[in-house]
Amino acid sequence: MRVYVLVTTVTPHLTIFMFKNGLVRLCTERYKRPRDSNLENVYMHLTNYAINKNSCNFVENKDENDEAGSKRDFVFLESYMQEQGVNTAKFWDDLADLMVKTLLSVAPQLEHVYNASLPRKNDGNNCFEILGFDVMVDHKYRP
């Protein structure tokens, strides 16, 4: 899944917002655990659009609300996970936690670039960045 995050400030403190919608890419063949007999089946193990668009099972989305295509949105994912009995509130909290921890791990580098690029005296609101994170979800619906 692709998660979009807006970083509005880096200094004096990191401020981020996670967009409540994003992109869910689906494999075009049902996933099976990797084995010698299926390792070559990239349509089963990769969600990459450039690969799956060549599959005979690929379904092109007609528009952004298409519920049959190989690309979906978070509304679809939320509904699907609820049907599977997943605690979706915990899923989204865990996903947000992952975004925060990822950005905190690079915060010193972001702050360095920010300080090197802008005048010393600024209010911390001189720029923003929109980042897209590709996140895999495991069989237990954990990001």
Image: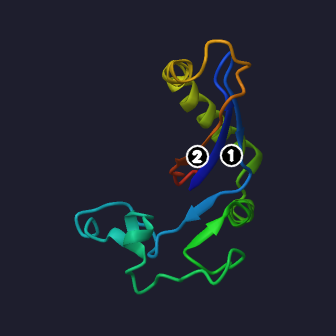
Q: Which residue corresponds to the image point at 47% horizontal and 81% vertical from the top-left?
A: 58
Q: Around disc 2, counting alpha carbons within 10 Å, would you say few (fewer than 14), some (14 to 19), or many (20 or more)?
A: some
Identify residue type, mark 2.
Answer: Arg
Q: Seen from this angle, which residue lies furthest bottom?
A: 56
Q: Are marks 2 and 1 in contact (CB under 8 Å)?
A: yes
Judge whether 116 appears above or below 40 on screen: above
Image quadrant assignment for residue 43: bottom left
Judging by the rendered image, the residue that carries numbered circle 2 is 142
Task: Give percent across and percent down for residue 138.
Answer: 52, 51
Residue 108 badge: none
Judge whether 102 appears above or below 36 on screen: above
Q: Seen from this angle, which residue lies furthest left?
A: 36
Q: Is residue 57 left or right of residue 65?
A: left
Task: Give percent across and percent down for residue 105.
Answer: 51, 24
Identify residue type, mark 1.
Answer: Phe
- Quadrant of the image for the C terminus? top right
Q: Around disc 1, counting alpha carbons within 10 Å, would you say few (fewer than 14), some (14 to 19), or many (20 or more)?
A: some
Q: Secondary structure at mark 1?
A: helix
Q: Which residue corresponds to the image point at 72% horizontal and 38% vertical from the top-left?
A: 17
Sequence-first disc among 2 and 1: 1
Q: Secondary structure at mark 2?
A: loop
Residue 91 badge: 1
Q: Which residue corresponds to the image point at 63% horizontal and 69% vertical from the top-left?
A: 72
- Quadrant of the image for the N terminus? bottom right
Q: Is residue 133 left or right of residue 19?
A: left
Q: Seen from this angle, which residue lies furthest top?
A: 120
Judge whether 22 appears above or below 69 on screen: above
Q: Nearer the viewer, residue 113 or 31?
A: 113
Q: Nearer the viewer, residue 72 or 128?
A: 128
